[in-house]
Image (cartoon, rainbow, N blue to C red):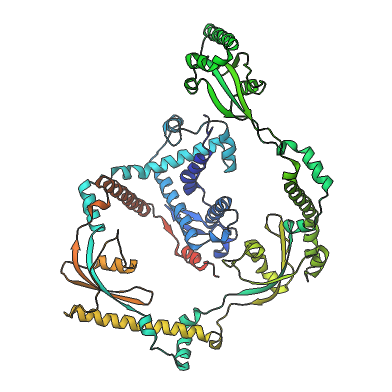
Amino acid sequence: MFDFVRKHTRLLQFLLLIVILPSFVLVGVEGYSRFMEGGNTAVASVDGHKITQSEWDAALRQQVERMRQQAPTMDPKVFDSPEVRKDVLENLLRERVLAAVVTDEHRNITDAQLEEIVRTDPQLAPLRGPEAKQILAQQGLTVDGFLQRLRQELQMNGVLGPIAQSALPTQASAGLAFDALLQQRELRFQNFAAKDFAATLVPKDADLEAYYKDPKVSARFQLPESADIEYVVLDAAALQGGVTVSADDVQKFYEQNKARFTSDEERRASHILIKAGADMSAADKAKAKAKAEALLAEARKNPAGFAELAKKNSEDPGSAANGGDLDFFGKGAMVKPFEDAVYALKKGEISNVVQSDFGYHVIMLTDLRGGQVRPFETVKGEIESELRKQLAQKRYTEMAEDFGNTVYEQSDSLKPAADKFKLTIQKATVRRKAAPDATGPLASAKLLEAVFDADSLKNKRNTSAIEAGGNQLVSARVVAYNAARVPALAEVKAAVAAAWVQDQSAAAAKKAGEARLAELQKGGDAKGLGEPVTVSRAKPGVLPQKALDQVLRTDASKLPAYAGVDVGDGSYLVVKIEKVLPRDPALIDPKRAAEQYARAWSAAEMAGYYNVLKSEYKATIKPSALAATAASAPTN
């Protein structure tokens, strides 16, 4: 239909992400159907048409694949969370609702309209050139497929777009909103901290026993499942230590690869350009060439005057003022006819007239640098290291298949593989998810998944050879499996005692704070309250966020007003609000405030209208689907 993307690959990828993927990339995690019976089970419906489990599975699977492409080393399970699953299902529901509106209202974008949008939209303007097919193919799309999906997305955007544009809040209404949002309050507060009560609390054994019997308490001390493993690692990098490189091999490599150890040659040239573009007539081109030939003859008569000649006659606006000087450049920097001519000259020589797409050039080579070969002694160590790496890689490649066969065929022990390949059997205790400080194979999600596979846990056989990193294979074997358990009180008595003290001291702090709050509300004196401070959402000062929210929500129509806040870290704040102050006008520009308010208003209008459409088209998500999503939350 038309060309795409000569440049700006990143822009197209961004476009694919923000325009297409939210609506069309709707597919999920392999095996997700364990939560529902059958891939055809309805998880949601729009206008009587169901969204099936398999469609949701597909959405999740493709999303995880996209994330894996963006972060190849990331554990895909990071993205397989209840929140992600729910968001994908909500996006799928939204797409179906908007598609239903498009169908019912016979909305359409013609080929001509689509082409005009692509041609004139500033975001799409750079999209031209033959690279589009390759880029789209990487996303599993053709140009026609992309255009069709863009058409559908534009049609659906047309449903909510006019609603957003209809939101026209005034600057006055924006001012009122920001007055409330950024209102300041002057207050004094007293902090009742748990640590101030902890010193007097000494638990007895009976206290701890009663405390630990509470399931909510004992659950805090549950030990997650783990496995004691043995493992061996075949690593190309480690093999380098056993590789010997001869001096003859190093010298031979140097001689055969001198070009690699030669610095890039750069040349400096000056030129005189007489323009002759493709749209110029043959007669005008002939005149331009004749002028260039005349200038060439004049330059060769007086090479020392080349710069002055270029200043007076060159039609290159970028270099004429500098006497035609183009500074140093390397190969590939200039168009080919120009480059070929420059690299054929000796220093001080002037070329014949050279024709390029720009016109006719007269070129003088003024200087050159680079092109020197680095001495052997300075690169000897570098070559040895590279050859050692190459030989180790070759050995690794030769050994990899044999390693995999050995751990598989003699799966009841890692010793045969360790002996055969001279590897050390290492030991570790691991969990289903890698520890934050784990490195190497123990950080591999693939290895941990294999270790905790039901067969590995039951039969304690070697895992298959797993690629844990670049040129690194690992096989592990479970020695002992430790199920998740709540330890006996005796095992964690010190930690339980510390938790008891924390809980009791926090309760004591809250009780004291509530008593002080009641006293102030009855007219008690301000003894113990700190100095007045002014706070707002923009400048919270020393107040914790939870306390700030409570203070700003407290009814201050009658002053002084009081608030008590359980901060959640064992502290309880008692606050006396003494003044309500207007927002600081310097915090936000009125025009910017109006723009931000308009965007927020537009978003709210669209959300409200979408909710109306959901109701009209009876768009619902089955509670059982959300329950299954929540139940699938991974545990450590």
Please indicate whether residue 391 sits to the left or right of residue 330 in the image: right
Give residue 282's quadrant in the image: top right
The answer to which of 104 and 124 lies nearer the viewer is: 124
Residue 77 screen position, x and y as percent: 56, 61
Please indicate whether residue 74 sits to the left or right of residue 248 in the image: left
Residue at left 73%, top 40%?
Answer: 375
Residue at left 37%, top 53%?
Answer: 614
The answer to which of 326 and 90 lies nearer the viewer is: 326
Residue at left 26%, top 68%?
Answer: 551
Please indicate whether residue 568 sits to the left or right of residue 441 in the image: left
Q: Is residue 123 visible?
A: yes
Q: Is residue 277 visible?
A: no
Give the vertical position of 177 relative to 219 (above or below).
above
Residue at left 65%, top 31%?
Answer: 265
Give the vertical position of 289 relative to 331 (above or below).
above
The answer to which of 315 and 186 lies nearer the viewer is: 315
Give residue 294's quadrant in the image: top right
Residue 266 screen position, x and y as percent: 62, 30
The answer to which of 101 and 199 lies nearer the viewer is: 199
